[in-house]
Image: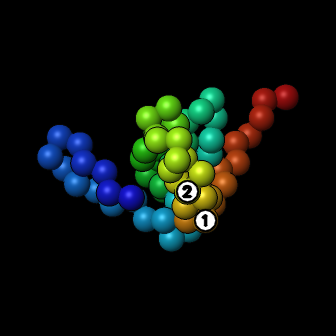
Amino acid sequence: IEVTSNDIIREIPLDGSCESSEFENMIFIFSQKGLDLIIPLRAVEEDFKADLQAMIVAGTSPRHTKRKE
């Protein structure tokens, strides 16, 4: 995934080196540095949503968070 912010272009690889999670209709992508990208699913065209989710799931590992007990 290529992300442009303030004229800085970064690539987020979908090669299994990043983690992802989906929560409250948003997809979060994390690298070793931390949170890299948030994709609000409301901003994705309905016809493309399933393909996007499939690409993220195939190219990242699921992020596991510790639960408070």
Q: Please provide percent x and percent y for residue 49.
A: 54, 47
Q: State whether residue 38 is above or below residue 4.
A: above
Q: Which residue is mark 1?
A: 58
Quick check: 20 left or right of 31? right
Q: Please provide percent x and percent y for residue 2.
A: 32, 57
Q: Please provide percent x and percent y for residue 52.
A: 52, 53
Q: At 48% across and 56% down in the image, what residue appears?
A: 32
Quick check: 54 left or right of 43? right
Q: At 14% across and 46% down in the image, what residue appears?
A: 7
Quick check: 66 left or right of 63? right
| SS at mark 2 in the image | helix
Residue 51, disc: 2
Q: Quadrant of residue 57?
A: bottom right
- How far, Cα to Cα, is label 1 from label 2? 10 Å
Along the line of sight, which residue is nearer the eye, 68 or 7? 7
Amino acid carrying label 2: it is Asp
Quick check: 60 left or right of 9? right
Report crowding for label 1: few under 14, some 14 to 19, many 20 or more residues within 10 A (C-alpha).
Answer: few
Q: At 47% across and 47% down in the image, what residue appears?
A: 34
Q: Quadrant of residue 5?
A: top left
Along the line of sight, which residue is nearer the eye, 6 or 49? 49
